Image (cartoon, rainbow, N blue to C red):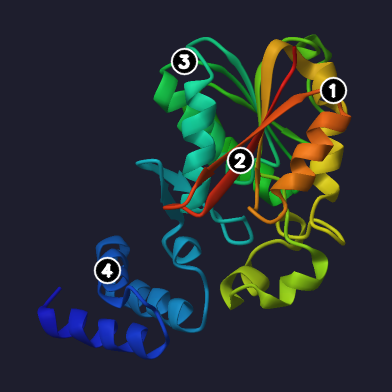
Amino acid sequence: MDDQIKKSITEKLRTAGCVFAEEEARLLISEAQTSDALFDMVSLRITGTPLEHVLGWAEFCGNRIAVDPGVFVPRRRTEFLVQKATALSVPGAIVVDLCCGSGAVGVAIAKALGSIELYAVDIDPTAASCALRNVTTVGGFVFEGDLYEPLPAKLRGKVDILVANAPYVPTEAIQLLPQDARLYEPMAALDGGNDGLDIQRKVAKEASLWLARGGHLLIETSERQAPKTIEISTQNGLIPQMIRNDDLDATIVIGTKL
């Protein structure tokens, strides 16, 4: 692909408001099989389709994760959730990834540790289908359903690590999100109810039933909402701790079962 074509695509992307236009042009050119395919991909991107949906994958913790249209795109800040879950875990641990979306979090933990017993759950059939493509590559299992409901009963009281990147955007704040999130990602992966914490409450309510003694529930939240997330953990019998990473703008509350 000659430099003139790359330059033309970069200009189109920049005009459309793509901040990293040159890098995106390089990725689109490298992934397109034909000129027609490249034209279609550029057209999708400049009309607002998330780059990851155009490419069909996202890079997350150094892994290439398949991301189908209509599936939540894993954010870089969520790499902090993976880092902390990995630090609290050991090879062979039982890990459950709730609200798993593409399955990126569970896959990244599995790859970091080398071997875990991974179970991923999402209520959205499109997400569960996408997660299946990713999670099975590390020997994990995917279930479609509402949080703990579809999990095998044998896991009760046995889970070492519960991770939940549950939706935590307050309903009224959805309209303030970037267009690519509002228009192209599932509302169920974004909307956390009036205060953004409805799903977190449901996750924490049953966590102690599933966690092993000394097990941990890790929930991604916002810095503003963290005090309430801590309160939710405490109310449900977990010992909470908040950890913040300013560089990634990432906040996690870890609830430990004693």
Snapshot quadrant of residue 156: top right
Label 2 or label 3, whichever lies nearer to me, is: 2
| Residue in the image at 42% along x and 53% along y | 247
Disc with the residue nearer the chain's start (2 vs 3):
3
Secondary structure of the residue carrying numbered label 3: loop
Left or right: 139, with 196 as reference point: left
Disc with the residue nearer the chain's start (4 vs 2):
4
Q: Give the number of the disc on residue 237.
A: 1
Snapshot quadrant of residue 29: bottom left
Question: What's the CA distance linking mark 1 and mark 3?
Answer: 29 Å
Query: Is mark 2 in CB contact (under 8 Å) with mark 3?
Result: no
Query: Is mark 1 in CB contact (under 8 Å) with mark 2?
Result: no
Disc with the residue nearer the chain's start (1 vs 4):
4
Secondary structure of the residue carrying numbered label 2: strand
| Residue in the image at 49% along x and 28% along y | 109
The amino acid type found where label 2 is placed reads Ile
The amino acid type found where label 3 is placed reads Ser
Q: Is residue 57 above or below residue 150?
A: below
Q: Position of residue 52 (x, y in %)?
A: 46, 61
Question: What's the CA distance linking mark 1 and mark 4?
Answer: 47 Å
Task: Quickly name the residue at label 2.
Answer: 252
Task: Quickly name the residue at label 3.
Answer: 115
